[in-house]
Amino acid sequence: MQSIWKSKGKKLHTRNIKITTYDYDGQRIIVEGILKDDRFQKSYEIIGEPFPRGVIHHMAIRLLVNCSDLLIEDVDVDLAAVPQEVCRETIDCLAPIKGLAITNGFTSKVKQLALGNKGCTHLVELIQAMAPAIFQGFAAHRSQKPSSFDPDQAKKIIQPLINTCHAWREDGPFVEMFRKKLNMQ
């Protein structure tokens, strides 16, 4: 059976987001997010000016995250390609997230701090994509070697995951298993 979504026309645009986690020093990780937009056809701005094909956005965010509390200790932004030079003025728009913990409400807090007339929608979109991947990177970091069971730490890790998807729904068997094991309510 063929999909009705099979591409038939010429490629116009791609957006790729890649998120990678690296060990930093055993206690902290670096989470790197890269967003790249490519336009494959010459186009025209709404005012009729030509806009060339090629890379529109190519930006990276690197976060230094402490694994003991999922606190962002440092933020680095790289704007390799932007559509307009004025976009480079937003390079520090994520500086206010330094010191935030990645927990419930993180993405809404980032929007409050980094959107608006001094922010960049694309950087905020990228960090929103990075937030859940930080948990995966943290889990990969933490699970490299056996550790002693710490119920308080486990509760801190599990609590933000509840109701994030069907498997982690509050009334589901997965959460119930953890609640029994950790004596959570």
Image (cartoon, rainbow, N blue to C red):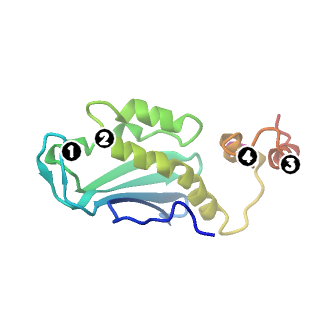
Tell me the residue that label 4 is attached to: 166
**Residue 91: percent from left, percent from top:** 26, 46
Mark 1 closeness class: few <14, some 14–19, many ≥20 residues within 10 Å: some
What whole-number distance in Å separates the C-alpha atoms at marks 4 and 1?
A: 38 Å
Name which residue type carries label 4. Answer: His
- Report the mark closest to the observer, 3 or 2: 2
Taking the spot 67% from the left edge, 47% from the top edge, the residue there is 157
* Callout 4 secondary element: loop
**Dominant SS type (magenta):** helix
Question: Could you tell me which residue is drawn at 16 percent across and 43 percent down?
Answer: 86
The quadrant of the image that shows the C terminus is top right
Asked which secondary structure carries label 1, the reply is helix
Q: Pointer 2: what residue?
A: 120
Element class at badge 3: helix
Q: Mark 3 points at which residue?
A: 177
Quadrant location of residue 104? Answer: top right
- Residue numbers of the magenta segment: 152-156
- Answer left or right for 68 relative to 65: right
